Structure formats: structure tokens, C-alpha cells
Image (tube, helix red, strand yellow):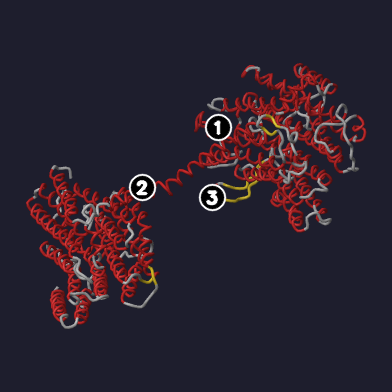
Amino acid sequence: MNWEIVLLFVAPVICSLPIAFFWVKEPGSERARKLPILSVFGLFISFLIAIHILLTYPNGTYTIPWLPDYNLNFVFIFDYLSKYMGALTAFIAFMIGLYGLEYMKHDYRLGWYWFFFNMFTASMLLVVYSDNLLMLLIGWEGLGLASWGLIGHWFRDDDEIAYVGIVGRKVGPLKMYWPPSYGGWRAISTIRVGDMPMFFAVAAIYALTGNLNISQIHWGALFSKIGAVGTLFLMICFLMGPFTKSAQLPFSEWLMTAMTGPTTVSALLHSATMVAAGTYLFIRISWYIHPWALHSVPGVEMLYYFVLLLGLISALYGASVAIGCLERKVLLAASTMSSLGLMFGCAAASYWFGKLALIVAFWYLLTHAFAKATLFLVAGHLIHATHDRFCCGDLNLAKKMKTAFVATIIATIALGGLPPLTAYWVKAGMDGIMHHLVEMVGSLPLDLLILTSLLYSAFLAKFLSLNFWKGDKYHLHLHGEKLMPFAYACVVSMVFLLLYRIVTGTDPLVERHLLEFGLEKGSLIVGLGVTATYLFALVVPRIKALSPIGTFLGDRMYLPALNDFIVPSIGWAISKLIEYTHRAIDWFCHFGLPEFMLSVSKRIRSIQVGYLRVYMKIALAFVMAVIVVSMLGWL
Amino acid sequence: MMLLMLQSVVSLILITLGAVCSIKDSRISLAVSILALVIALPVAAATQLFMYVLLVVAIGILTIFSMSVKENQMSGVDYSLVALIALITIYIAYTNDVAFILAAFVIASVPTYALVFAGDRPMVDVALKYIVFMVLATVLFIIGTLMLTFSSKAGDPTLYTLGFVMLILGLGMEVGCAPMHEWVPDVFSAADPLPLSVIASITKIVPFVAAYKIILLTELPQLSNLTIFVAFIAVISMFTGNIGALTAKETGRILAYSTVANMGYVIATLSIVTSKNYLYLAFAGALLQLIVNAFGKASFFASIKTNGNSRPLMYLLALSFIGLPPLMGFWSKFFILTSLVGAGLVWLAFLLIVNSAISIPYYLRIARNLAGDTVPGKVTAIALVASAAMLITLIPPNWFVSVAKMIIGGV
């Protein structure tokens, strides 16, 4: 068991080292281009172990001692969440690895790519299986570092195909296009903003409880101890990490420009790693916080209400942006943000609804991961085939890329929530939960959810329509790819496995709950509405009359101003302030102080006139003054 | 004690004879004066004061050599006078008798009246400034001492206050504390450097030891209210000396202001004389600072006479004045600072550190002014011995605190 767990994390990294080093020695050589197979083999080992864990391991924690005196150990947890999530991560990473063998065949920096790709996977697996928050942070940081490396992979910024936005377009002072190097910087800098408060929160949790194992901390006692304000402060600091990693408002910009990385990276980043890490962590700690049992603890309700609204508003924002997007990958990125918002919202509803809300959120995560990975892989294939990152294509293209076409249909329907495919049942669960919340917190969450769902199916249909049916003209350059279609076909087929588990009620925790939700009248009505918008958007993917609104939405409601204008302006202001401070210090040291000293020194020396009578006057005057003062009793 | 008396009589006879013989040949006086100092060593060998006696004898011989760098109109007699000052500097450590202390104060001071005339040509106006200030200082010191002695027996607080103030004023004027320092820059820049190597160095020790002893002998409860006055003088003196030295160009003048500043550091320790826990540490710091000052000033003034000296030795002495560990100048300031902080005068310690920082440029300027080639000779030997003394504190001089305790502990 011991070696197997270690191998799970270490195998991908070790197997990527040969290419990482060999590429430095012989960049681009034929021999070097064969080594990525070894990297994918490392991912395969992780995949096998994750499946083994899923199928055979008993639930519970497994500890490898590190600093037992301080209660800091490598603690791995095997429960419902981590087993599924680990298998999902390892499977998708392996499949994208296979896809990448073909997709990245001609790249100029394979050593860099495969090392960070495998490190990305290993870090995510560490986050998934960690019970200890400190160990989790190691994986968490690995994700941040690897995402920087991968998003900025094409660091030369020399290929327009890797940019986000229309090159050269400006709106006011804002440049509305982003090169890969800037994308990588935006990712790491945004994530740091969230990670810093999170580190302090973890330290505070350790200081307050002496324990860092999520499943062992007495969260209720901790929250009671620090009071409502303390709870809100501590947990919002902690959740700043998940919020930034999962690109919730207002930290969403980095996710959009993360599309400057290779498509394989986008696929992995948006389905099973990185962004999913944030929601996964929130679901995991809520799983052990038991918020539904803490109604008497002050502050917890406000915290969950905050996350609920933040998630749902981010979801609506993401869906609106996706409606206006015409870039294949940016559209999908906005949709990811929307889905993450739904996961946060649904998981936060657990405070009122109980554990089932967490399970529904988690199942939505699983469904989304498979479908979104498929869509990204298809988008990557399309970009390769058409040499265009904007939506384009027609039925002729669909005929030539049948697998991609079919996979996109399945993925959009399964993710959009059209009955009777997978997401319908999961979203029906969400509908039911939000409906239940109307009595407690009002109808706002339900309204946001339904609006988001409608928009969501609309832009998925738009994606399908503009790429395979009613899109612009294109030039096709097919190279007879085999591995790429195979990879996304495998991934998309997994949504049927999920569907099977839901419909048959064989999952131990989901049981028949989702089936019951799905058969309710309200859910069916929403399902029909979603289907109607899907079909409408399929037939009418673009409405010319509404293009100003589309531009506004596609420009992400000008939120880039926050990242590219407001925050840098503050930074510049601070640097100006520092510059002036430096100048003041320089003036003081080079001019003010010496001049002052000089004048005082000259004054002191001006006494020395050379006449004894003057000296005696001064000395005797001082002596007399002191004597008089001392006699007056002042001394 | 008998041995000590015997030694003192022999020494005095020796230096008198030396002075007389100098009519014939001043070299006899040189040898005899040094002998008179050296025989003080075996007498002190068994006591804990040995290190103090050794250091004073070293300074004494150094200053005698310094006087012998160039012949002057009273060559021979001057050696005896310096030896007399050195001997009285040793003997004051042994006594707790107020009359003897006062006598020591006068004996250490008066020979310099004659010495200040020594040189290539007598500078009467400069000597006059010096003598007038010294006489006034001596009068104030003696009257202050008498008032303190009387009032501590009679228990008169007003008279005690007056006596204390006059004692401190006299002390300040004698050693050159601001704002009674006017004579120092004039004398130090105009008089011959060789007698100055005596006046600026060894003669500063006795007044402070005397003041310490008298204050401790006559202590009344209100003393603790009066010490703030000493701190006041110390602060003025430090700032006047250090800032004044910054723009001075002549080496003699820089050394004059450096003396004012150093006397400020030393007199600062008198402000915690009522703190029984830190008294000895404070006195150890003061005495060590005086010894650093004596070695350094003697070498610097002798070097002025020869227009420069060995470069590394000049820099080493300057760095010791700045207070760079592990040189002796660091330990003296360290003792002073520790005692000030321990006794609660953190602000004074802070100002002292600020002043140490201000002093860095001008000490380096002194070293640069005087730095030259290393030529074997008397002046180089003087600087070499002084530098060696600065280096004896490579081993932290904890022992010096017990020496200091011996000197004023019996009071």
C-alpha cells in the first residue's frame, strides 16, 4: 500500500524527467521526440493506481509519519470524494496525455511541456488525496507553478494562434489581446492574491486547533471558539485560495487568458485539475465541516450564503460572457467559469439542504469534467485542422471529422442539461435543491440557476452550430490524426457511465435521489426550456441585431480593466510613491543632513575667535548660570 | 603598604635627581624617569590593580618618549614632570583620603602648566589661555570638594547641591567638556604637538578618578536628583565635539573636538553613579575610554610632530576610537552603553550611539591626514605600542570590571 501511494504521485514526475533533461541536451532531435511516450507511461501508472484505489481500498485515512511531534504528517484520505476524483483526474490526464503525443508532436519545447504537464497531474493528485492541509498546500503550489509554466508555454509570443483576443484591437486604454507570456503571468499573479490569505488561514487553523487534518479538526468547536466575525474572516481568507483557483468573480480574468496555452493544457486545466481543485477543496471541507449541523454556530450561515451568491452570480456572468464569445477556447473557458460557479453555489446550499447538495455538486463536477475535456480536445483538433482559433466550419467539415462532430453533440447535450442525458439529472438535483431554498433564503438562487441553465445550453448549441453547421469559411488541413479522436471519444463515453450509475441508482450515496429529482414536474419544465433554447441557438447561432450586446459580453463586460488597468494603476501609484520616498531619502542623506551638520558645525566652531576674554565670558557665564539655577532649586 | 611608600619615595627621589642631572645630560633624566615608573610594577604585581598600573606605566613611558622626539628648552625636566603625573595617576587608585585625592588632582594638573610652554618656540598666549582655564577649573573643583565634604557631614542639602555643581563644572573645565571647552581647540591646534601628547592623554585620567572617589565618599540621598545635570553636560559635550570635528581641517583641531566628545562619553557615566548595580561597569567603561583616549591621542599628536606615521597603525587607532570590535575602543563604549541601558538611561545610550556614528568621518579623516610610510623610529614605536594596547581586548576584557571595582570599591 505504501509504495503504491508514493508511486501514484512520483511516477508521472520521474517519467517526465528524461524528456525534460534530454530536450535541453538535444532540442528537437528525433530521439528526443520519442521520449514523451515515457511521460505518458508515467501518467498511465498513476491511472492504474487510481483505479486500484477506487476499486479495492477501504475508506479511511493512511498516515506516513513526517513530524509526529507537531502532529504534521503525510495523511492520505480515501473516501467517496477522493476515490472518484482521483480516478477522474488520473483518467483524464492519461487520455489528454495520449492526445498530446499527437497534438504537440512538432512543438519546440517538449521537455518543458511534458515536465510541467506531469507535474500538474501529480500536484492535483496530491491535492485530491491529501487530508492534511499542509500537504495539500504543497500540491496546491505545484498546481500554481505548473499552470504558469504551461499557460506561458509558447513564451516567444510569436504565433498569433496562441493569442487570446483579436490582435491589435484596443478599447479605450485597454489592449484587448493577450500573448501567452502575459497569460502565464496573469494566472500566477492572480492566484498568489488568493494563496497568501489561504496560507495564513491554514496557519491560523493550526495555531487554533493544533491539527491540520481536514477530517479530524472539530470545525464546529473551532467556529464557536472564534465567534461569527472570526469564522467569517478565517474562512473567507481560506476560501480566497479556492476562489482564485476556481476563477470566481472578480478573479476570473486569468482563466480566460489561460487559453494562450496549448489546448491540451486548457483541457486538463478546465476539467480535472487546477480550477476543479478549488471547488473540490470547498466540497471536501464542507463534507467534514457538516454545515447542516452547525445552525447554532454564528457566522456559518452568512459564510455559506456568501459562497452561494458568489457562485451563482459568477455562474451567470460566465454564461453571459460565453454567449458573446466567438473564440472557440475562450467560449469554453467562460463556460467553465460558469460551471464552477454552479458547483460552488450548489455545494454552499448544503448548509440548508444537507449532504446531498455536496453530492450533487460533486456529480456535476464529474459530468462537467468529462464533457468539458471532450469539448476542449475537439476544439484543439479543430484549431489544428482549420488553423483558426475562432469558430468556423460547416456540415462539410462535420462529415470529414465525424468523431469530433458526434463527440461534440454528445458532450453539449450531456453538459447542457437536456433530458435524458447526464447533466439533466444532475441539474434537476440542483433545481430541486434551490427550490427547497426558496423558503429559507428567497427565490434569488433558483432564478439565477434557471437563467444560467438556459444561457448555458444556448452557448453550447452555438458552439456546435458555429463549428459544424453554420460557421464561417475555413481552410481544412487534416493530417490523418488517430490518437486525438480516440482520446476524446474515450473521454466523452464516460458520460454514459455516469448516466448509467444515476439511472440505475447503483451509486452508494446518490442512490435514486437524482432520478427522483429528475422526474419532478418543475425539473421537467426546466429541462424542456433548456431543450428549447438549445434548439433555437442551434438554428440561430448569431443574431446580427444584437451584436453590440454580444461585443459587450464577449469583451467580458470589460472586467479586463481590473487586471490590466486598475490594479496596475495602483501598482504604478505605489511605485511612484516609493520613488518619491527614495528621492526624499536621497535628498536627506546627500543634501539635507550634510548641509545641516555643516551649518551646525560652523556655528559651534564660530565660538573660537581666539580671545581669552571672550572664552572666559562664555565659561564664567555658564558657571554662574548653572550655580544660579541650582540654587533656585531646579537641579 | 610599606612597600608602596618605599617605592613612592624612591621614585620621587629618582625623578628629582633625574631633573637635576638633566642640566648635564637630558638622557639621564629619560632613563631615570622610566626607571621610576618601572619600579612601580613589581610593587603592584601581587595586587589586582596590576593591569591598571601596567597600562598607566605604559602610557607614561609612551608620553615620555613622545616628549623626547624633539629637544625643547626644558628637556630633561619635562620627562620628570610626565613621570610625576604618571606616578600620581597610579597612586590615586590606592587612596580614599579626600585630602590626598585633592593633592593628586593638583599634582596631575600643575606640571602641565610648565609643559604647555615646551616646544620649538614658547607660545605665551596659548599657554595663558590654558593656564587661566586650568586655574579656574582647579579652584572650582577644590571648592566643590570642600563643600561636598562639609555638607555631607553637616547634612546640608543646599550646600551639597552647590558643591556638586561646582565639582562637575571644575571637572568639565579641567578635561574640556562643552560648553567650557573654548580653550581646547585653540590650545590643541596652536601649541606644540609634543606636550599636547601629554596634556590630551594621561592628564585626563586623574580628574575623573578623583571626581568618582569624591562623589562616592560624600554621597547624600539627593545625589540621584543631581545626576541629570551631568547627563546634560555629557550630551552637550558629545554633540559639540563630534559635530564641531566634522568640518575641522587641521588634525590638531579635529583631535581637540574629538577630546571634547570623548570627555562627553566619559562624563556620561557619572550620571549613573547612584545606580549600585551598574556603577562599577560604568566606571570600568569610563576608565577604559580614558585609556583608549590616552594611547590614541599620545600617538596622534606625536605623529603630527613628524608629519605622519605608519598607515595601518593610524587606521587601527582611528578604528579603535570609532569603536570597532574587538579593539579596546569598542569595549569601553560597550561598557558605557551597557551600564547606561541597565541603569535606565536608554535615551542617553541612544544619543551616544548616534554620536559614535557622527564621529566616523572625522576619525577616518585623521587617519588619512596622518597616514604615511612606515619608517622605523620613535614615533612609529609609540604608535605600535598604542596599537598593541588596542588589541589586548581581543580577549573580552571582563577582568577590567574587577580592576575598576578595586579602584573605587573601597570608597
- Structural crowding at the residue carrying mark 2, measured as other residues with C-alpha within 10 Å and reported as few (<14), some (14–19) or many (≥20): few
Amino acid at the residue labelled 1: Gly
Q: How far apart are labels 3 and 2 at the CA level?
A: 58 Å
Task: Read off the chain for label 1.
Answer: A
User: Which residue matches tag 2?
Assistant: A596
Task: Read off the chain for label 3.
Answer: A
In percent of the image, x 35 and y 53: which residue is there?
B353
Above or below for A30 versus A336: below
User: Which residue matches tag 3?
Assistant: A69
- In the image, which disc is placed on residue A220? 1
Classify residue A269 as left or right of residue B260.
Answer: right
In percent of the image, x 42 and y 48: which residue is there?
A591
Q: Quadrant for residue A294, please give it.
A: top right
Q: How far apart are labels 3 and 1 at the CA level?
A: 25 Å
What x and y, as percent, mark residue A545? 78, 19
- Structural crowding at the residue carrying mark 1, measured as other residues with C-alpha within 10 Å and reported as few (<14), some (14–19) or many (≥20): some
Which numbered disc, 1 or 2, marks the residue that appears first in the sequence?
Answer: 1
Classify residue A172 as left or right of residue A232.
Answer: right
Number of numbered discs visible in the structure rendering: 3
**Which secondary structure lies at badge 1?**
helix
